[in-house]
Image (cartoon, rainbow, N blue to C red):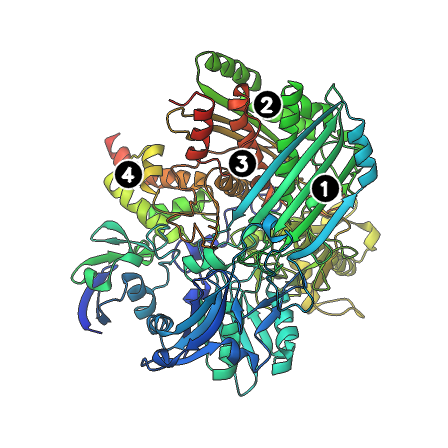
Amino acid sequence: MAQHQIKVKINGTDHKAEVESRLLLVHLLRETLSMTGTHIGCDTTHCGACTVLLDGVPVKSCTVLAVQADGREVKTVEGLEQDGKLHAIQNGFHQEHGLQCGFCTPGMMITSSALLASNPDPSEAQIRQAISGNLCRCTGYVNIIKSVQHAAAALRQPAEAVAK
Amino acid sequence: MATTTLRTSPEVCGMGHSMKRKEDPRFIRGQGHYVDDIKLPGMLHMDIVRSPYAHAKILAIHTEKALAIPGVLAVITGETLKTYGLHWMPTLMSDTQMVLPVEKVMYQSQEVAAVIATDRYTAADGVDAVEVEYEPLPVVVDPRKALEPGAPVLRTDKEGKTDNHIWHWETGDRAATEKAFAEAEVKVKQDIYIPRIHVASIETCGCVADFNKTDTHLTVYMTTQAPHAIRTVIALVAGHVGLSEEKIRVVSPDLGGGFGGKVPVYPGYVIAIAASVVIGKPIKWVEDRMENLQADSFARDYHMTAELAAKKDGTMTALRITTLADHGYADAAANPSKYPAGLFSICTGSYDIKTAFTEMDAAYTNKPPGGVAYRCSFRVTEAVHAIERVTDVLAQELKMDPAELRFKNFIPADKFPYKSALGWEYDSGNYKAALEKAMAGVGYAELRKEQAEKRAKGELMGIGICSFTEIVGAGPSREFDILGIKMFDSAEIRIHPTGKAIARFGTKSQGQGHETTYAQIVAEELGIPAAHIQVEEGDTDTAPYGLGTYASRSTPTAGAAAAVAARKIRDKAKKIAAYLLEVSEDDLVWEVGKFSVKGAPQKSKTIQELAFAAYTNHPPGMEAGLEAVDYYDPPNLTFPFGSYICVVDIDRGTGEVKVRRFLAIDDCGNIINPMIVDGQIHGGLSMGLAPALFEEISYDENGNNSAGSFMDYLVPTAMETPSWETGKTVTPCPHHPLGAKGVGESATVGAPPAIVNAVVDALSHLGVRHIEIPMTPEKVWNILKEKGVAE
């Protein structure tokens, strides 16, 4: 099988790898680079446990080939925390009990972070719509929605404080 | 009382505090440690060849092409395992099931062979290259047809077996029940089918088996809810090939949900272990979602007929339920040994029914084996669905309000402990209070008024009630065992010299938050801050023996063990305090975190000071150290309960059921962590909504699975799931050291009948009496069309 040299920026760091044509992005992350925060739950793009940002857009990395990420930028759960400071979405999930088993959590947080980047004050309906491609079996989504709202409020706070 | 009394400060964070979870920091950073995250040096990968047929003879398995692929190291077949006597294995219910077949396959997606390769892609290539020749055999998918004379006998491996009947089970007084029905003023009868569903935890099942040929030590990292039991099972099943229990270590790392689906031993685990023993290298096997849905243990699949006898005033006089259980090709249910139908006999529910009888027959079919929980204590969901549905059918027959009928028949609060007609001693309850709170919470009278107005306009709105009683926390050793091992559970607490602690348990969290709640229990009992108590589970080399986490048993068993072990530590600390303060033990009083002298409160020793003294200045004649272990054998099960009210609107154009409101009032006794309990209820409600409206695994006449991926198996998303509302009443458990009951599964049990009752209620004026789950838009729309109200 053909091999390809690819270069992908992941969480701000450049990675080079030689990969088979068929290698999935999720396996590049988990197997080749040992970044196991991104999970696999279904193989059919339904559960969203494998969600990462590709050039800022949430994608299900179980149905994206590693070669499709060549020359592009990927953000995973490992890249949410910056300089030892949790991303607001991580703190939101902790404060509002938005996770139980933790398996869907990385994908759920990544999807939510993309929502908040484009919509700082989403309604409950907009949050539900945004995470509808991410399945959670533990929480019933109630506290996940509160977690996203918690993060949204925290992210808005400095701007609102300035406005006042 | 609606809340649990707080006895500790937020710093100590004992019972009743909504402590933020101690397990969160690793999960929110993507640093959880699940089975598929494990990578060992030299590790190989396994993938499985599965049958496209539901019933077929295996004529030949050609492995040459697979073995010719670079990186494919071995193909394991039933014949390979037969040489080690490992091609069959026992089930928890003393039946047998194949690990890999030698003669024939019995269900679609059954394991046929396993490929071992250097990486998972190559293993998958190998699976594609294995060629299997099959000769299809007649398929039996309907358990009723399976029991008809002349049906093909499926278990030809069982000598002398001439039919597909597995067992008959019955309990209660048949004759008295027949008499009560003969004399009844009113009788109702309802067929109810609870279809096959699947837990579909977001993490599938898998393991890494690591056998060291030099020291013959086996370590298995495994998605299991019961690591200790698994270790013993491995020793019993594979002792003859040299696996000895002292050299077996089972580690259950972080689990991405369990819900009962990670209790059984699946063939994949056994093949991976066998492969590691033969090859001497670590073998990883992780199933994909299709394998998970198509081959792992199912739940439910009960065909029930429920009958209620009553007086004209609504007083229930007798209950009879007859069930046909479809077990697939083997009885691999995860039940306590003495309970082939689990705890189905809780089916008299919350009602004071004096006479009852229930019987069940189980049948083999060409479907995957199983009978696991799907987040409920052994078959309690089926029982509650039957009684709560037939109660509404009776209300309809009597033209009584379903709430009024329930109030009329509730076991009164002053009758506890209550002995049910089918033999259970309900420990405590106050059913009236829970339903009253739920009705007040939703504004029941106003909703009925609104419904009447809507009906006049042709709109379809329904209100459904479910007042369930659960039975969880198995269980007392006189009755409860799995493979002979009694269903106690355990806690071991060690207090370090600086007053911090480590506590280990025989259970295994799958998201329930044990690292937090168990720490809170120890904090409650000893006054050591929960933040300073490290909780560990899941490693059989370090944790005390226990039966694991399922059936809402962790708080009733291991949680109780934690309290008792902590009290043993407190007793020893008291002796040390008496020594240090130079008083008699009788002169000491305990308040959170310290012993002080009666009448002289300034003379005291904190638990931290006593811990230090236990290692540095312990009394002469006393053993050093401060630790205790407890194996807790519960005197009874716990009986959590609740009343749920669901309000639905039905779209006459599409048949879609919209859950407008759902209020769950739960009573799980004293609460350890309210935040976590609410989270458990939210999750349980969602796993009750799922089978009520969406999820079903059905089979066509050839035994083809119709919902074998998330394309067709409809796990609810945030779009379909309503905003759950919760509330509590608190009726402490009289026999649990903390007054607590299990809670993780209450909502899964209570939600489906509330939703069905609401939908039927919306259509009752049209003569609809029952609807089978899942109540899909198509099913509901066809009813609307039949009744002439579809738009």
3 or 1: tag closer to the N-terminus? 1
Query: How far separated are the C-alphas under marks 4 and 3?
Result: 53 Å
Q: According to the image, label 1 marks what residue? A: B733
**The N terminus of chain B - image quarter:** top right
Q: Nearer the viewer, mark 2 or mark 4?
A: 2
Q: Check disc 2 and report its element: helix, strand or loop.
A: helix
Q: Chain of mark 2?
A: B
- Badge 4 crowding class, 10 Å Cα cut-off, few under 14, some 14 to 19, many 20 or more, is few
* Disc 2 from disc 1: Cα separation: 24 Å
Q: Amino acid at mark 2?
A: Met
CA gap between label 2 and label 3 equals: 26 Å
Q: Nearer the viewer, residue B535 or B419?
A: B419
User: What residue is pinned by disc 3?
Assistant: B772
Provide the secondary structure element on which disc 3 rests: loop
Mark 2 and mark 1 on one chain? yes
Q: Residue at x 61, y 25 (%)?
A: B437
Residue B39 visible in the current orientation: no
Q: Chain of mark 3?
A: B
Where's residue B705, x and y in %? 45, 53
Helix, strand or loop status at disc 1: loop
Residue occupied by mark 4 = A158
Which numbered disc flags the more N-terminal residue, 2 or 3? 2
Q: Are marks 2 and 4 in contact (CB under 8 Å)?
A: no
In this view, B740 is above or below B337: above
Amino acid type shown at disc 3: Glu
Give the number of the disc on residue B439: 2
Side (left or right) of B395 relative to B18: right
Residue A29 relative to residue B708: left or right: left
Q: How far apart are labels 2 and 4 at the CA level?
A: 43 Å
